[in-house]
Amino acid sequence: MTALQILEAVILLLGIPMIVGSLFRHGVDRKMRGPVFWWISGQIFLWACFQLICVPLILLQVDFKYAAAGYNVVQALAVLAAAVLWFRNRKRASAVERIGGFDRKKSVRSALWILFWGLLIFQLVQAVRMTYRDGDDAFYVAITSITQNAQIMYRKLPYTGFGTELDARHGLAPFPVWISYLAEMTGIRAVSTAHVVVPVALIAMTYGVFYLLGGILLQEKKDVLPLFLIFTELLVLFGDYSFYTVENFMIARSRQGKAALGSIVIPVLLLLLLCLLRQLQEGGAASLKYYVLLAAANGAGCLCSTMGALLCCMLVGIAGLCGAVAYKRWKMLIPMAFCCIPNVCYAFLYLVLGS
């Protein structure tokens, strides 16, 4: 990989999502206004956009280049909208929004943050240095490679490379195609993108989500936030006691959509629902931006895995019912039901096309 290719990957996986995520900086929770939240929310929103663009084109058997072009247009429009909104609100926005949690006057706390960053860098390096081929790579990484090289989506057998009928069932969760998009835009080979570029970004995103969760759960004890993150890292480092643990998927199988679903999307949903319940407890109400991001998280779950359509919908539905009963806010169930429409649609398509 050249320096230019690495720069392009950073722009696609960090720069653009952070710009797009700034659209939601005043719409979810007053605590969620830092760059970490911008990055996470922006990527979730872009994943949902990719799902909405890619799946219809897969079902219509359209070539991959049109999906990539359509996604580029959506990204450009989202960045433009974020820029316009930023300049409109620049007078009200603070010059620097705190990323949070670091107090230089407290040496112990500073040492904990340094330890956290050291462990994070260690994990990122090990994820790249000790990457290995997984049995599922014969399917998922092969789809990524075929999509980039043949410019077709789910119309070749990943095990043999021969042509076949459209694999619509797996095409409903085109996370491998998103990796193909990254490879196509950066010029990095699909296998290298899946094994090197994607793990670095998604592992860092995972800790970003836990940073945000810790900020909400420990808002009255922010001094222990770095300690919370360090214990999270230790659980991940020593969590490979089974082939099917979340920790194993996060570190060793980050390139698979199931890993992104369990490590990123579902925790993001928990974060959003926690913010909602806190707002209800304080007598407030969620904004339109909040429900847009909640719907995007549901759509991102569908992109990662067909299981996401059911799991995310169940999580939102149960949390909505609990909030409505506990705080007697039954009207909130209407927008939350609309947020689950993507899941219902993709679940229906799965039943129809997968049978």
Image (cartoon, helix red, strand yellow):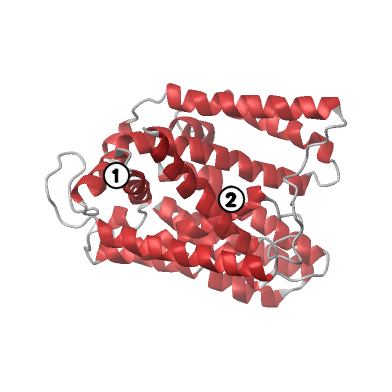
Residue 301 x %, y %: 48, 55
Residue 131 x %, y %: 40, 25
Would residue 66 appear left or right of 245 to someone viewing this image? left
In this picture, is 332 found above or below 230?
Answer: below
Residue occupying image coordinates x 22% and y 63%: 62
Residue kind at label 2, given as amino acid type: Trp
Q: Tag 2's secondary structure?
A: helix
Would residue 350 appear left or right of 116 to someone viewing this image? left
Tell us which disc is closer to us: 2 or 1. 2
Q: Earlier in the sequence, mark 2 or mark 1?
A: 2
Residue occupying image coordinates x 64% and y 52%: 37
Asked whether the beta carbons under mark 2 and mark 1 sit within 8 Å of each other, the answer is no
**Of 88 and 31, which appears nearest the observer?**
88
Would residue 142 appear left or right of 122 to someone viewing this image? left
**Of 151 and 249, which appears nearest the observer?**
151
Q: Which residue is mark 1?
A: 144
In this picture, is 193 found above or below 98?
Answer: above
Q: Tag 1's secondary structure?
A: helix
Quadrant in which residue 328 is drawn: bottom right
In this picture, is 19 found above or below 208?
Answer: below
Residue 310 x %, y %: 47, 58
Q: Which residue is mark 2?
A: 39
Would residue 285 appear left or right of 309 to someone viewing this image? right
Quadrant in which residue 337 is drawn: bottom right
Q: Quadrant of the N terminus?
A: top left
What's the distance in space between the residues labelled 2 and 1, CA to CA? 24 Å
Q: Is residue 355 visible in the rendered structure shown here?
A: no
